[in-house]
Image: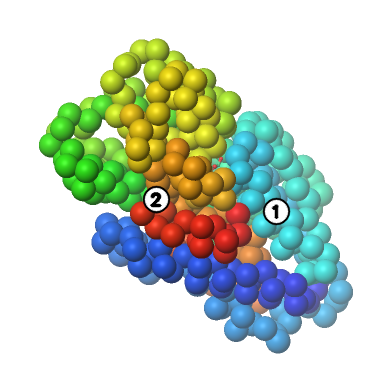
Amino acid sequence: MKRKVLSALLIAAMTMTAVGCGNKSADTAAPAETEAPAEAEAETTDDAAEAEADDTEAPAAAASGDLITVGYAQVGAESDWRTANTESFKSTFTEENGYKLIFDDAQQKQENQIKAIRSFIQQEVDYIVVAPVVETGWETVLEEAKEAGIPVILSDRMMDVSDDTLFEAWVGGNFVLEGETCGNWLADYLDAAGRGDEEINIVTIQGTIGASAQVGRTEGVDNILKEHSNWNMLEMQSGEFTQAKGQEVMESFLKSYDDIDVVICENDNEAFGAIDAIKAAGKTCGPDGDIIVVSFDSVKAAFESMIAGDLNATFECNPLHGPRVAEIIQKLEAGETVDKIQYVDEAYFDTSMDLESILAERLY
Ligand code: AHR
């Protein structure tokens, strides 16, 4: 009971190709440590190329003229990244492309997502897509979806479930690798500044505790921190992935410690808040400042912040998952198998690069 995927989906997929090309220069500039691990490499998506290959083919069940109904349980609207992710789903899952999208914003609350999933089951949607707020606590509701015969696809963050038949596939960023890339970048940066052997005091503004992006980035940075006995992690606190909370946490760090060398923000929006707090405290940040500021996501505003000299570096997390999830759905519709775990290639950006040119091509 599904319908043909129209040209707009292909345009969306081709847009993804452009994103991939745009990132290549930064990919090339990335240190060896940014390479995906072997297990990730095998499963990294090449969505645009594959979607383009399907150009003229209508999906197997295309003829009846019905739309594919997709319920998307979104985390919330806490960051620029999330806004771009929502837009990616809304512009992909359109009626023109053969879909009816039921979108739910959980306002960063797991209980709201569970309610949304139950509502999708009641409405007998064809597919449920979830970007889970946190990793744990999903078994019961996923079993309900399985019982109802509705395939579940995870996007962005992961769920920690003992039975992996409860979901069809997951697509998102390699958060541990992002954290390790950040740690390795910091080591190289300090070495280049002649500070490789100095005592370095670090604070971290974490994301939502228990979210894959928080768990993975904290773990990845910690893996590199263990290699540097002169790095001291003074304190870690959650900034809930928001600018307001990021500012609040940085204000409290600055009151507690007068010798912070580095703040690691687990997303760009937290960094924007932290930068405001640093300036309000009469300190400076960025390449010429008192405090090194790094963050994750690489949204457009992070490029503006680097160009302004406030932010040192940002480690990419690509939010444009709409076409990737659509590709998974189309494969399932065609009765094909899909890779269970699909990592997206990601880069990093810092002030040594031609940021104006990269920003001019940036899609989010
Ligand atoms: O899960 C991805 C993270 O969630 C992004 O880093 C952040 O901006 C968002 O809130």
- At a point 41% along the width and 67% down the height, the residue shown is 25
Q: Secondary structure at mark 1?
A: helix
**Res. 338 visible in picture:** no
Task: Classify residue 312 by image quadrant.
Answer: top left
Q: Which of 258/36 is in front?
A: 258
As displayed, is residue 68 above or below residue 79? below
Q: Which of 279/70 is in front?
A: 279
Task: Classify residue 348 by image quadrant.
Answer: bottom left
Q: Position of residue 290 (x, y in %)?
A: 33, 29
As displayed, is residue 87 above or below residue 276? below
Q: Which residue is mark 2?
A: 351
Q: Which residue is mark 1?
A: 87
Left or right: 215 in relation to 127:
left
Q: Which amino acid type corresponds to the residue marked 2 in the rendered image? A: Thr
Q: Position of residue 299 (x, y in %)?
A: 55, 49
Q: Which of 253/335 is in front?
A: 253
- At a point 49% along the width and 43% down the height, the residue shown is 308
As displayed, is residue 64 above or below residue 350? below
Q: Secondary structure at mark 2?
A: loop
Q: Mark 1 and mark 2: span between their CA atoms?
A: 28 Å
Q: Which of 21/215 is in front?
A: 21
**Res. 251 visible in picture:** yes
As displayed, is residue 308 above or below residue 84? above
> How would you rate the neighbour count of disc 2 (Cα within 10 Å): few for under 14, some for 14-19, many for 20 or more?
some
